[in-house]
Image (cartoon, coloured by chain):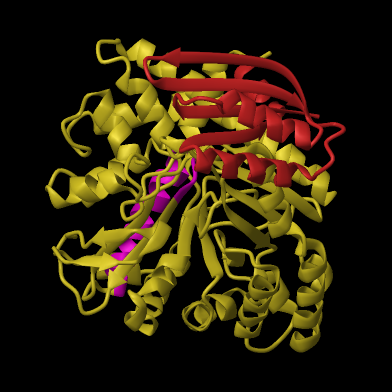
Amino acid sequence: MRAVVAVIGKDTVGILAKVSAICAQCNANVMDVTQTVMQDFFAMTMLIDITSCNVDYTVLSDRLKAAGDEMALQIHVMHEDIFNSMHNI
Amino acid sequence: MFNSKDILETIKMIQEENLDIRTITMGISLLDCIDSDIDKSCGKVYEKMMRVAQNHVKTGEEIEKRYGIPIINKRLSVTPISMLAAAAKGDPVKFALTLQRVAEGTGVNYIGGYSALVQKGFAAGDRELINSIPEALARTSNVCSSVNVGSTRAGINMDAVALMGRVIKQAAEMTKDNSCFGAAKIVVFCNAVEDNPFMAGAFHGVGEADCVLNVGVSGPGVVRSALSKMPDADIGEIAEQIKKTAFKITRMGQLVGTQASKILGIPFGIVDLSLAPTPAVGDSVAHILEEIGLESCGAHGTTAALALLNDAVKKGGVMASSNVGGLSGAFIPVSEDAGMIDAVNRGSLSIEKLEAMTAVCSVGLDMIAVPGDTSADTISAIIADEAAIGMVNSKTTAVRVIPAIGMKEGETVEFGGLFGSAPIMSLSKFSSSKFISRGGRIPAPLQSLKN
C-alpha cells in the first residue's frame, strides 16, 4: 500500500529532513519526492510505501500532521487510491 | 508518480472548497422483523439493526482517515415502517422510539424510513403511521419520515395530500419550542426513489437487497471554484467544465463506497451524484448559478442555468460510477444554502421561482420556512403543485416546508448546524381549501402509459 504525503507552507530549513526522518522511524520507504518552491511558498509531494510500516497508518498520519503543526506547515497524508480514482480514468 | 498539480488540486478541493462525502447510508431491510406483536417486532428491529450497523460509524471514520476526505454523515435507512405497522397492531410511535435507540446505540446521525408509500391508496398501517408522524418526530431527535403521495404511474393520492398538510402543521406545532424542527424531518414525495441516501427522505425500498451501502457525494464549492476560473467561457464550455468536475467528485464517492462496502461486508448500492449545499461559505448551489452569470439567484434565467447545471452534473458523474442512483442532481434547499438565503433576503427569490426550479433540479421545495398561520390546506396545495410537476415530468419531486409557528413573513427561523437558517417566505393569500377538500385521486397522466 502506498500513500501520498503533501506538505504545503512557508519554506524553512529542514522540512524534507524532518518529514523523511518520521517516515524512516516508521519504516515507511520514500519512493519519490517532488518539490516546488515559488518565492516563499513550499509545496512538496512525496510517495511512500507503507507496506512494511511498523506503526498503524493513522499513527503515521498523526505524527506527520503533528510535525507539520510544529513547523507551521500543512501536512496531508492520503492513500494513493484517491488520486488514482480522481485523476485517472 | 502522480502529478503534483493533481495532488494539490485534490487537497485544495477538500481544504478550501468544502469537498466532502455528504453521507454513507446503510440501507437495512426490516421485512424479516415483521411480527403481529408490536413489542416483539420492535425487539427484532433493534436486534437486527444493532447487529448489521454496529461498525458503520467506525468504518466511516477509518475511511476518512485513510483517504483524508471528510464523511459528514453516517446514516441508516430502513424499510418503510408502515409495512411493519400493518402487521403489528399498536402505536407505531414505538417503532420510532426503537429507531431512536438504534441511532444512539450505533452513533449514526440519522435514521430514515418512518415512511409510508400511499401514491395510489392507503393500505393497512399507512394511515396509523402517517397520523403518528408528528408525535414520533417530536419524541425522537434522529428519526426522519417521508411519505410518497404520488407517482407518474399511479397519479396523485389527494386524500394523502390533504392529510400531509395537517401532519406537517401538527409536527411544527408539537416542536414549536425547538424551531418547529419536527416539520424539517418530514418529506412528502412524488416518485420517491428507493435508494436515496439523503435525509430526510431516505428509506430502504422493498425491491432492495437485505442490506446495501449507498453514498451521497457533494461539492458545490468545487464546481463554483472551477467556473470562477473561466469568466469569458461560453455556455458549452461551462457545461463541459461542470461535467469534468462532477466526474472527479463522483469518482471519490465511488471509491469511498466500494471501500466501505468491502470493510463492512455488504454490497455496494449506488452513488448519488448530488450537489448538496451546506450553509458554509462557498458551499452553495445558488453561488454556482450566480457564477454562471446571474446577478442574484432567482433572476430570470435561473431555471435555465439550473437545468444546465443539473444535466451536466449527471453526465459527468454517470461515467465515474458503476451504479448511479438516488436523486442525482442539484439540490436547492433554502435554509441550507447561504446563497439561497441571501437571495430570499434581497427579494430576488420567491416561492414561485423555486417551484419553477424544481421542474429541472433533482428534487423539490426543500427546507423552506412559511408563516406560522399558513393553513394546512395551503400546505397541501403546495404539495399538490409539486407532486404534479413530478408526476408529469417523470421525476422525483418533494416538499419539505416548515410552518414557523408564531412567526411571520420576513422573520428568520434558526435551525443551526447543517440545517442553517430559513427566512420565512411569503405565500399566496388566496385559499385552495375547496380544491383540497374534494379528496380522491388525480388519475395517472398519459405519460404513465408506456407499455
Q: Which residues are magenta?
A: B376-397
Q: Is residue B388 magenta?
A: yes
The answer to whether residue B421 is above or below residue B178 is above
Give left or right: position of B145 versus B61: left
In this orientation, which residue lies closer to the viewer: B429 or B41? B41
Image quadrant occupied by the N terminus of chain A? top right
Q: Nearer the viewer, residue A13 or B218?
A: A13
Taking the image as shown, residue A38 lies to the left or right of residue B84, namely: left
Q: In the current view of this chain or complex, which residue is farthest to the front?
A: A13
**In the image, residue B423 above or below residue B300:** below
From this view, report whether residue B39 is shown above or below residue B353: below
Residue B300 percent location from the top left of the image: 18, 32
Q: Which chain is red?
A: A
**Quarter where residue B267 is shown:** top right
- Residue that appears at 52% across and 30% down: B11
When asked about the image quadrant of residue B238, the answer is: top left
Q: Nearer the viewer, residue B13 or B173?
A: B13
Picture coordinates of residue A16, whole percent (x, y): 60, 24
Image quadrant occupied by the C terminus of chain A: top right
- x and y, in percent, of residue A85 in the image: 67, 24
Q: Which chain is yellow?
A: B
Residue A79 visible from this viewpoint: yes
